[in-house]
Image: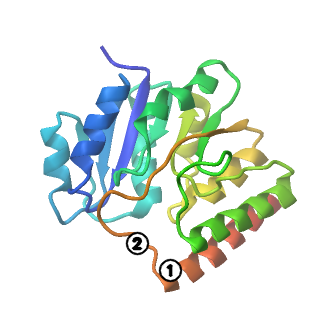
Amino acid sequence: MQSTTLVIIPAYNEAATIGQVIKNIKRWCDADILVVNDGSTDGTSATARAEKVTVIDLPCNLGIGGAMQTGYRYACRYGYEFAVQVDADGQHDPRFIDTLVQPLLAGKADMVIGSRYMEDGDYRGSLARRAGSRFFSFLLKLLTGQAIYDTTSGFRAVNRRVLAYFIRHYPPDYPEVEVIMQLLRQGYRLKEIPVAMYPRKGGHSSITLLRSVYYMLKVSLAVVISYLR
């Protein structure tokens, strides 16, 4: 029997971690699992398939935006009520998946963001990442009046209303902050709850110094443009 919740795992060259991530999700929740293999050149797809979950193999690397929109389209096509994004590198604690979905079930939010920064926890991350998140938090608060502490968190859950929006409107490049602005401007209700996160268990971050500069400029401009629309 199909679950009402789909966990979407976008994955690019995460063969070292994807198997354990899937096992942990199965341990803590009964949701269906979809791995979107984003043009990986390692054994990501085979490792995920060995765990008996659905895998979509993209023919080339589209980036996180294209991978997630693929997952959202799948969720809408097969009638899921909720979708939860979980990273393939082991940073997100699957014990919190049901916690993220609860406000959606209760009709209290359209998207729920899992936050590393709402409470004092073990997660620290790099100084650059914390500074970037704080900057975007400040920018969103300035433009919308709503405080979002972990603007770059990819651990988030959405309901069917947001799924229908995302299959039409989803940024292809660094979408996390931009979609917050988009949803707030469209009148969707966002809620943030504290969760546990951990350093990546394997692989390497794609964010280099040059990409960090591009990221800050691109996302800041996209947020302002979304606000002005």
- 79 up-or-down from 193: above or below: above
Question: Can residue 46 be spotted in the picture?
Answer: yes
In contact (CB < 8 Å): disc 1 and disc 2: yes
| Residue at position x 73%, y 68% in the image | 135
> Could you say where residue 48 lies in the image, as x and y percent from the top left?
20, 44
Of residue 189 and residue 167, the one placed in the foreground of this image is 189
> Could you say where residue 3 lies in the image, as x and y percent from the top left?
38, 20
> Could you say where residue 19 lies in the image, as x and y percent from the top left?
21, 45
* Circle 1 residue: 211
Residue type at mark 2 is: Ser
- 110 up-or-down from 117: above or below: above
* Circle 2 residue: 206
Looking at the image, residue 81 sits to the left or right of residue 138; the answer is left
Of residue 198 and residue 41, the one placed in the foreground of this image is 198
Label 2: state its secondary structure.
loop
| Residue at position x 65%, y 32% in the image | 110
